[in-house]
Image: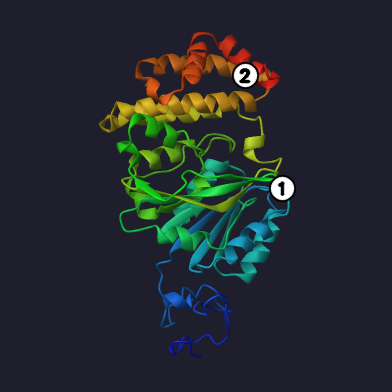
């Protein structure tokens, strides 16, 4: 068989189909679908002429009770216009049919690897997936979400040799409605730590979304970046996001909304009031990292203060009312510790006054949230 340019396919596997009908340039072997013809690579068999073990993308999928969403999620990845990827799934002790569906999908696609064990939480699961990754780049895709077919190709197009990660926009999927989130209206490249105070605030306090990042794996390994492991799933990527933003020499933000974030899943960590102190544990660990890595300067502490305040505000609205006062007291301890590192340029006037109230009186912090909920 030859492609339209006359290149003869000499891979020993004989059954082929076109998977990119737009330009007829990309082919896949039906027996070993990890062969990417346009890249002249085959990852299936070392005896094959085109065997190349250097996969481009490792998709990391931590799974917990996600059976009803898996066909859509993994199916969207399989439709990608870039085909040289692996999907690594780790079932974190699911009690539904998640593992059964994963094994079914793995039988049909040898790019999928499936692991399972007892429940240990999101951060432990993600760290184990990072350890198993073999691709040049890694990306986290949650099992209840899905992606655009062009996501990988678009992001790879911005990933030059100096870029540590590329971050795209996404869609909040709200059932019969959707909302677009963009970090930027046009493609931009920069080093986060070299931004001015206002720009740092706008960037670091923007939506924390690990699943919109295509990250160079060598960058992660060189800096030994992993998630800080605390119980549950909420806030588990907080420390990881802070570290990649702080340590990156060059990132790229692109406006394309290429990821679909499912907000209808009632079992998602962001919908659960469990582990009300999760952000406290995460930010106290980040503070310890900042103190041990003082070479990054006071700006890191200032950014941490602003991020922590915004995160604690959001958490107060998420947790149960009976947990709020305890959380507010712990938040007060942190805000007092942050006081000498506050950069008011990173706050609006209203935000700074709210910070002062929360720092001075935990009861006021609780009342502030209750008043917002009442529309007062």
Q: Is residue 162 left or right of residue 255?
A: left
Residue 37's spot in the image, x, y percent? 47, 78
Q: Confirm or deny contact between disc 2 and disc 1 (CB under 8 A).
A: no
Q: Residue at horizontal 48%, vertical 31%?
A: 282
Residue 350's spot in the image, x, y percent? 51, 18
For the residue pair 261 and 338, the one nearer the viewer reads as 261
Visible residue check, residue 141: no
Q: Is residue 173 left or right of residue 26?
A: right
Residue 273, label in figure: none
Q: Which residue is mark 1?
A: 95
Q: Is residue 108 above or below residue 247?
A: below
Name of the residue lying farthest toward the front: 185
Q: Is residue 55 left or right of residue 73?
A: left
For the residue pair 267 and 113, the one nearer the viewer reads as 267
Helix, strand or loop at disc 1?
A: loop
For the residue pair 340 and 173, the one nearer the viewer reads as 173
Nearest to N terminus: mark 2 or mark 1? 1
Q: Which residue is mark 2?
A: 369
Residue 235's spot in the image, x, y percent? 54, 35
Determine crowd level at label 1: few under 14, some 14-19, many 20+ residues with C-alpha closer than 10 A.
few
Visible residue check, residue 12: yes
Name of the residue lying farthest toward the left: 295
Residue 316 lies in quadrant: top right
Which of pointers 2 and 1 indicates the residue nearer the eye?
A: 2
Helix, strand or loop at disc 2?
A: helix
Residue 65's spot in the image, x, y percent? 69, 48
Q: Is residue 203 above or below residue 333?
A: below
Determine crowd level at label 2: few under 14, some 14-19, many 20+ residues with C-alpha closer than 10 A.
some
**Quadrant assignment for the C terminus:** top right
Residue 30 lies in quadrant: bottom right
Q: Residue at horizontal 50%, vertical 45%?
A: 210
């Amino acid at each position: 068989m030859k492609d339209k340019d006359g290149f003869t396919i000499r891979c020993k596997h004989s059954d082929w189909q076109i998977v990119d009908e737009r330009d007829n340039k990309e082919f896949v072997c039906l027996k070993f679908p990890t062969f990417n013809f346009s890249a002249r690579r085959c990852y299936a068999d070392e005896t094959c002429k085109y065997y190349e073990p250097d996969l481009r993308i490792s998709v990391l999928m931590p799974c917990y009770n996600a059976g009803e969403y898996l066909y859509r999620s993994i199916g969207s990845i399989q439709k990608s216009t870039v085909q040289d990827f692996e999907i690594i799934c780790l079932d974190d002790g699911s009690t539904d049919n998640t593992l059964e569906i994963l094994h079914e999908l793995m039988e049909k696609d040898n790019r999928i690897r499936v692991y399972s064990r007892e429940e240990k939480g999101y951060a432990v699961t993600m760290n184990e997936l990072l350890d198993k990754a073999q691709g040049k780049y890694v990306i986290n895709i949650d099992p209840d979400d899905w992606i655009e077919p062009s996501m990988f190709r678009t992001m790879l197009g911005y990933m030059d040799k100096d870029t540590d990660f590329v971050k795209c926009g996404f869609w909040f999927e709200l059932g019969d409605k959707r909302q677009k989130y963009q970090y930027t209206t046009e493609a931009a490249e920069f080093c986060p730590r070299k931004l001015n105070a206002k720009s740092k605030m706008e960037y670091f306090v923007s939506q924390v979304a690990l699943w919109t990042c295509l990250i160079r794996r060598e960058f992660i390994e060189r800096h030994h970046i992993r998630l800080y492991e605390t119980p549950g799933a909420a806030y588990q990527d907080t420390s990881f996001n802070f570290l990649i933003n702080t340590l990156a020499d060059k990132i790229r933000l692109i406006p394309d909304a290429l990821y679909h974030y499912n907000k209808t899943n009632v079992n998602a960590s962001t919908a659960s009031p469990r582990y009300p102190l999760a952000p406290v544990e995460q930010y106290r660990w980040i503070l310890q990292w900042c103190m041990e890595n003082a070479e990054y300067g006071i700006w890191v502490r200032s950014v941490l203060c602003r991020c922590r305040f915004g995160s604690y505000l959001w958490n107060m609205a998420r947790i149960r009312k009976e947990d709020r006062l305890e959380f507010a007291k712990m938040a007060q301890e942190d805000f007092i510790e942050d006081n000498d590192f506050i950069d008011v340029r990173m706050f609006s006037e209203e935000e700074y006054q709210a910070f002062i109230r929360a720092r001075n009186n935990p009861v006021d912090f609780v009342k502030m949230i209750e008043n917002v909920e009442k529309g007062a």
